[in-house]
Amino acid sequence: MLHIENLNAHYGLAHVLQGISLHAERGEVIGIFGRNGVGKTTFLKAIAGWLKPSGGRVLLDGTDLTAQSADAMNRAGFGFVPEDRRVFPGLTVEENLRLGLLGVRVKGAKSLDLAFDRFPRLAERRQQPGNTLSGGEQQMLAMARVVLAEPTVVLIDEPSEGLAPMIVAEVFAIIREMSAAGSIVLLVEQNVHEALAVCDRFIALERGAVVLAGEADSEPDRSALLKELAV
Amino acid sequence: MPDIMDYLQFILAPQMLNGLALGISVVLVALGLTIIFGLLDVINMSHGEFYAVGAFTALALSALGLNYWVLLALVPILLLPVGVLVERYLIRRVYDGGDRHVSTLLLTFGLALVIEDILKIIFGPNTHRPATPLPGATEILGVFIPTYRLALIGIGFVVIAAVALVVYRTRLGAMVRAASYDRNMAASLGVRVGWVYSGAYAFGIALAGLAGVLLAPIYSVFPTMGHDFILLAVTVVIVGGMGSIWGAVVAGISLTQVQAISALIISPVWGDAIIFGVMVVVLMFRPQGIFGRIGHA
């Protein structure tokens, strides 16, 4: 179980995360919504080890992982697909994917073939540098290199941004697969309607704090969320 | 016509081969410098002093009776832990605080002064001249080349090829390039970025030490020997593109050839002026250098 307790973070004097708490069970997809600049990306970065929290705790299956480095979080079972994909531009598709295999905890459990079977478009482009791929292909690559490690927790930031509807559908299908495989998914997404279709629960943030929490399949909760985001 | 052939055979060709020997050595120093800059974003002002440390370590160990060819492998290996310690306990302490370029530049400059003084205290300020491990000359197409310089060129090419192979064709190299592009993303995929940084710094220092061992029999060994050489290496890194491995190779060999040929055509005193002039022109019209950073070319 993922348990986030009263997480706080600062950028200099700015108090950007103000005591966010959240828990999630295996296989759950949690949507994290809110307008621009409310702290959604910062929340994921603070969990992933990109930003040191100034308070609070991150626990996975009872182990305290607060303020661990990003590589330590990877070894603890966290995968991160950040905004803008962050594909390594001068590395080939294959090299990008091989880096994803660093996170494989059971040696030999996964291979590149598995990624290429699931993402045949990447197989066709395996020797191409990452920066020559289209936006959709880069998103697939960013997700594939995280999927390979079968992380316990996957943090995904704005995966549908700037993508064609067909690719967006593919992205959400992968999120469903990760959830079905038992991963906990924390999903930051502007495309609320699409995201709610894959989420089990959601939270909404405002000025770095949770202002609303609800069930994705509850109509009153969804209405409250849409009302909150429309303000 | 015979005069031209004699000029080519007895003056120009030996001069160009001497330039190539110097170029290969400069490339070895510049490679370390450019890898450290490309990955850590640190201008290592103590790089020339580690080149001197390599030469002095070889000098001291050869006095104990160790074979030169053993030293060629041993000295870079001995410098690896030194590099790890310097990165972990000095550079990393100032790395994330304030202006990284200024703080690391001042730190490594201070380290250079300390190393230089330690070398003066241990070995004295005088010049040492180790014996050439391969005396004599070898005839190639009628041109007599000092055998040791030929060996240096060969060893240099092998080392450069090995570095390129590791950086561009291995998983370790992919991790280094990934950390160079995006430290956070690489770490989130499981790359131990701290170790990659320490390893890259240590590797760069080891390459400088190797160049020191290689050049000790050709140039004299003295505590300030790193000064002139580091200027040339920095120029090579700037012209080639800061952080570019191929840039360092191309610029290192080209600039030393320009220096060698201009010494014949104009005058040896113009060599440095021409090379630094090229650097100024590159900075004015292509400030990123001929190539980009690690992995870009």
Image (cartoon, rainbow, N blue to C red):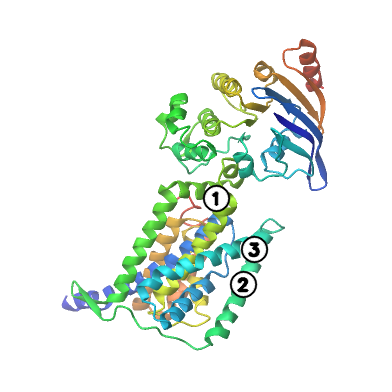
Q: Out of B89 and B95, give the one closest to the viewer.
A: B89
Amino acid type for the residue under numbered disc 3: Tyr
Pointer 2 residue: B111
Pinpoint residue A104: horizontal percent, then vertical percent: 52, 36
Q: Out of B174 and B272, give the one closest to the viewer.
A: B174
Q: Is residue B27 left or right of residue A230?
A: left
Label whose residue precedes the other's in the sequence (1 or 2): 2
Pointer 3 residue: B89
Asked if labels 3 and 2 touch by Cβ distance under 8 angstroms, the answer is no
Residue A25 sits in quarter: top right
Circle 2: element type = helix
Label whose residue precedes the other's in the sequence (1 or 3): 3
Badge 1: chain ID: B
Pointer 1 residue: B180
Badge 2: chain ID: B
Amino acid type for the residue under numbered disc 1: Ser
Asked if labels 2 and 1 touch by Cβ distance under 8 angstroms, the answer is no
Q: Is residue A208 visible?
A: no
Q: Considering only vertical position in the picture, is B127 above or below B207?
A: below
Residue at point 61%, 44% (across, down):
A71
Mark 3 Cα within 10 Å, few/some/many (few <14, many 20+)?
A: few
Residue at point 64%, 73% (across, down):
B110
Pinpoint residue B20: horizontal percent, then vertical percent: 34, 69
- In space, the residues marked 1 and 3 are separated at their CA atoms by 21 Å
Disc marking residue B106 = none
